[in-house]
Image: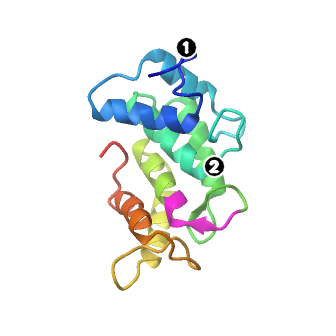
Amino acid sequence: MSRGDGSIAGYVSYTAFGILALRAAGEPAGRPTIAWLVRAQNADGGFGLAPSSASDSDLTGAALQALAVTGRAGSAAARRAVAYLRGNQSTDGGFGQMPGRSPNSQSTAYAVQGLVAVDAARGSVERALTYLTRLQRTDGSIAFSSTSNQTPVWVTAQALAALRREPLPL
């Protein structure tokens, strides 16, 4: 499954979610895979799609969840990722995918799950949950953002885990 360097296909996304899937199956990720994920962290503390990609809230949240299930919730890598997320939180409590982008429910959900997984930034989590709650529609779905209701089933599914404060694996 993993390459010789420990990654899963050379992507942070595949590696983080692979670690979470292995954990859900009761299997260890292996030291090389965990070490590769830690090395893939960017200088700003965040994680991107691949080691050379710009950091974003989604993958930083996913990486935090992977670090947590491998016993690294209190590591330097986790602390730096938390700091990245806190710096990327908008004044309305939501998280944009990348710095400077408008907040959305999916990026906010990933960030919340990551922060909850490592038991960090409780004030940020509460503000993010308030943001998600404000986006709930009368039919119960969660809107993608204040200006878009795209993919309501997918968005709502991601937001529900965050609203319940449940990181992956569920």
Which image quarter is the N terminus in?
Answer: top left
Q: Is residue 95 above or below residue 65?
A: below
- Quadrant of the rendered structure where residue 69 is? top left
Is 16 situated left or right of 27 in this image?
right
Reading the image, the residue beneath label 2 is 56
Q: Is residue 133 visible?
A: yes
Q: Nearer the viewer, residue 162 or 74?
A: 162
Q: Is residue 73 visible?
A: no
The CA distance from mark 2 to mark 1 is 26 Å
Q: Is residue 160 above or below residue 24?
A: below
Reading the image, the residue beneath label 1 is 4
- Quadrant of the rendered structure where residue 148 is? bottom right
Q: Is residue 77 above or below residue 170?
A: above
Q: Nearer the viewer, residue 166 or 49?
A: 49
Q: Nearer the viewer, residue 74 or 46?
A: 46
Secondary structure at badge 1 equals: loop
How dense is the environment of label 1, judged by Cα within 10 Å: few (below 14), some, or many (20 and up)?
A: few
Q: Are marks 2 and 1 in contact (CB under 8 Å)?
A: no
Is 67 situated left or right of 4 in this image?
left
Question: For the magenta stretch, what is the residue range?
Answer: 101-108
Furthest residue in direction top, as rendered:
4
- Residue type (three-letter) at the residue carrying disc 2: Asp
Q: Residue at x 69, y 63 (%)?
A: 101
